[in-house]
Amino acid sequence: MLHPSYSDLMNILNENVEIGDEPVVKSRYSIVIATSKRARQLIDGDKPLAYSKSNKPLSIAVEEMNTGNLYIKGSDE
């Protein structure tokens, strides 16, 4: 099981969205794509943006997203 959950990550990524605006993350698919791209960057040598107990790139990417260091850009950004 993924910790934190997908719904927790969606709430973290959408917390800065104004009321009435469309959320940046609408599905778990967006989270999966963003974390997998970030994990690939970590494999290729990028420095982690957050501390993680794990050495696995995907776990580090999820932790970066959970701490707010990694976010998904909206269509207008």
Image (spheres, grey):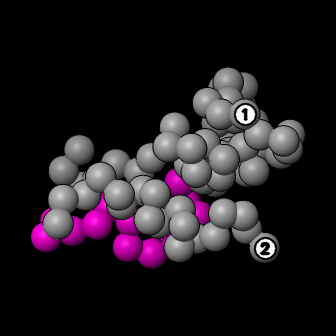
Asked whether 33 falls inside the magenta stretch, the response is yes
Work out which quarter of the rendered image holds the C terminus and state it: top left
The amino acid pointed to by label 1 is Tyr
Mark 1, Cα crowd under 10 Å, few <14 / some 14-19 / many 20+, is: few
Can residue 28 be seen in the rendering of this structure?
yes
Image disc number at residue 51: 1
Whether 27 is drawn above or below 55: the answer is below
Q: Residue at x 72, y 64 (%)?
A: 3
The answer to the question of whether label 2 and label 1 lie on touching residues, with beta carbons closer than 8 A, is no
Residue 56, placed above or below residue 51: below
Q: Image quadrant of residue 45?
A: top right
Q: Position of residue 36 (x, y in %)?
A: 63, 54
User: In the shown orientation, is residue 30 left or right of residue 44?
Assistant: left
The residue stretch that appears in magenta = 20-34
Q: Is 8 or 71 nearer to us in this picture?
A: 8
The image position of residue 11, as x and y in percent, is: 44, 65
Q: Which residue carries the number 2 mark?
A: 1
Q: Amino acid at mark 2?
A: Met
Whether residue 38 is visible to the viewer of this picture, yes or no, is no
Residue at image position (61%, 30%) is 49
- First of labels 2, 1 by sequence position: 2
Q: CA distance from mark 2 to mark 1?
A: 20 Å
Q: Nearer the viewer, residue 45 or 58?
A: 58
Q: Which residue corresponds to the image point at 18% horizontal and 50% vertical from the top-left?
A: 76
